[in-house]
Image (tube, helix red, strand yellow):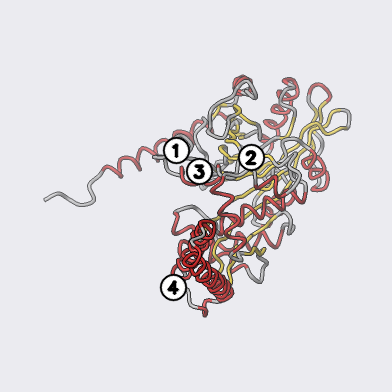
């Protein structure tokens, strides 16, 4: 394609994967959606993807990944999800880049252009309370509206996630400082899992079935959406081992039972000895110590009781599975969960903690728990998951959301009418009786 020129000396062109990756990695709005790895993956799945750049005097000042999709009626959409990457404080640059994107969308016969800048809408704290004195990008929403975009609202978007929970890792020096930034309950769960021998393993093509079984089981039990197995197979084949981390938490049942049994026997022997000493001497100090040791004995007995349903023949069990992505400045927890039968082992806690340690070790500055809802109250769906994430420390992050602009107005309005008609028909059908009343 020949470069397209715009005002202010800007030039639009298609970028190579290497050019795009170099720009996106260094950009403050970097995210895994706008990456060369994810681009290769989408191409392998047959998607129409284009990497673009906008230059000023030869230097890249904006870039992004465009996805072109066509529905069954031939309606085509050009989307730059979590982008484009550019300086949104430069109003002239925003205006000119939007103009170039609209031209490109028209060249590719798209009827609408969608963008969703990877920028905070309004700063929020751990409880979701607004702090516009820190960050307030509401004026940008009005600015984009002035350029012809329609904001799609601020409700939770499950397709293009716009509500997240993020923990900052920058400035944390070691694991001890990291764990002290979590709640008491979370620290206890982390240390319990470590003591009990829960370990992590990254899935490969050879072990993908183990990962997928745990993921799909957790998804079916918890009711969350997960992709087909082929999706994860394709990720492993087309992206790097650092970019795609399909992580599993595992427990060796025979080894765990043996460890607990040995600890129980040791503490029971200590309790017996202390009890004899207390009976003979009446020592209050030893009586207090006996209470502590007896609590441990009781705890180990409960642990053995809890795993009675898992015979040694189970061997090594995969108790949880989570899909993580590592790119740019952050580690992202995309989707995953714990198999209900094994929830006792705190597998998800181990995975979150293990990947936080990975982020700290590799120099990532953020740990992104990704899609988060149920923030407003305990009666909301998803509130339990939000509270779980909150235990690790961090803040709610609300992004700007999606923006839609007509490129071919007639087709755009016709598509809206069709969608409205389908929605109305579904609503009507939902109200009809399932069978004729007697």
Q: Which mark is residue 419?
A: 1
Whole-Å distance between the Cαs marked 4 and 2? 46 Å
Look at discs 2 and 3 and give the one toward the viewer: 3
User: Real-space Cα distance between discs 3 and 1?
Assistant: 36 Å
Residue located at (58% from left, 39% from top): 164
Q: Position of residue 302 (x, y in %)?
A: 45, 66
Up-down relation of residue 373 to residue 359 (above or below): above
Residue at the front extreme, as displayed: 281
- Residue ID for mark 3: 387
Picture quadrant of residue 417: top left
Quote the CA–CA distance across marks 2 and 3.
Answer: 28 Å
Disc 2 to disc 3: CB gap under 8 Å: no
Q: Point out residue 287 in the picture as x, y percentages from the top left corner.
A: 50, 59
Query: On the image, numbered disc 4 is attached to which residue?
Result: 309
Describe residue 52's horizontal placement relative to residue 56 as left or right: left
Q: Earlier in the sequence, mark 4 or mark 3?
A: 4
Taking depth in this image into account, of 428 and 63 the one nearest to the observer is 63
Name which residue lies at 60% across and 59% down.
231
Counting residues from the start of the chain, the first of labels 2 and 3 encountered is 2
Query: Residue tagged by mark 2?
Result: 81
Within 10 Å of the Cα at label 3, are there few (<14), some (14-19), or many (20+) other Cα atoms?
some
- Which residue sits at x=73%, y=28%? 97
Pair 4/1: label in front:
4
Q: Is residue 279 visible?
A: yes
Q: Point out residue 349 in the picture as x, y percentages from the top left corner.
A: 57, 54
Q: Nearer the viewer, residue 143 or 414?
A: 143
């Amino acid at each position: 394609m020949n470069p397209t020129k715009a005002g202010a000396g800007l030039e639009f062109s298609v970028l190579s994967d290497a050019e795009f990756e170099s720009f996106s990695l260094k950009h403050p709005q970097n995210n895994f959606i706008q990456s060369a790895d994810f681009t290769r993956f989408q191409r392998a799945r047959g998607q129409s993807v284009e990497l673009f750049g906008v230059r000023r005097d030869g230097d890249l000042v904006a870039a992004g990944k465009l996805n072109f999709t066509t529905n069954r009626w031939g309606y085509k959409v050009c989307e730059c999800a979590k982008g484009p990457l550019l300086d949104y404080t430069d109003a002239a640059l925003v205006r000119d880049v939007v103009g170039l994107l609209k031209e490109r969308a028209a060249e590719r016969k798209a009827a609408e252009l969608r963008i969703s800048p990877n920028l905070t809408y309004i700063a929020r704290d751990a409880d979701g309370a607004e702090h516009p004195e820190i960050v307030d990008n509401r004026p940008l929403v009005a600015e984009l509206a002035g350029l012809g975009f329609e904001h799609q609202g601020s409700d939770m978007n499950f397709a293009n996630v716009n509500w997240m929970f993020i923990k900052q890792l920058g400035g944390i020096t070691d694991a001890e400082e990291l764990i002290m930034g979590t709640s008491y309950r979370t620290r206890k769960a982390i240390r319990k899992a470590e003591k009990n021998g829960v370990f992590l393993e990254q899935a490969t093509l050879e072990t993908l079935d183990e990962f997928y079984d745990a993921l799909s089981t957790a998804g079916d039990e918890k009711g969350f959406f997960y992709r087909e197995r082929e999706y994860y197979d394709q990720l492993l084949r087309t992206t790097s081992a650092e970019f795609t981390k399909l992580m599993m938490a595992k427990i060796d049942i025979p080894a765990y039972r043996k460890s607990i049994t040995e600890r129980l026997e040791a503490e029971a022997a200590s309790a017996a000895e202390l009890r004899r000493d207390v009976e003979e001497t009446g020592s209050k100090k030893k009586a207090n110590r006996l209470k502590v040791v007896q609590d441990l004995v009781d705890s180990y007995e409960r642990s053995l009781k809890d795993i009675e349903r898992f015979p040694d023949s189970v061997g090594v069990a995969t108790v949880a599975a989570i899909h993580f992505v590592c790119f740019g400045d952050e580690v992202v927890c995309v989707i995953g969960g714990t198999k209900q039968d094994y929830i006792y082992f705190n597998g998800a806690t181990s995975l979150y903690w293990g990947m936080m340690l990975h982020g700290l070790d590799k120099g990532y500055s953020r740990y992104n728990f990704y899609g988060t809802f149920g923030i407003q109250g305990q009666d909301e769906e998803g509130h339990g998951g939000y509270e779980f994430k909150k235990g690790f420390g961090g803040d709610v992050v609300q992004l700007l959301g999606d923006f839609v602009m007509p490129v071919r107005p007639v087709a755009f309005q016709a598509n809206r009418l069709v969608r409205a008609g389908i929605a109305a028909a579904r609503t009507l059908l939902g109200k009809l009786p399932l069978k004729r009343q007697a």
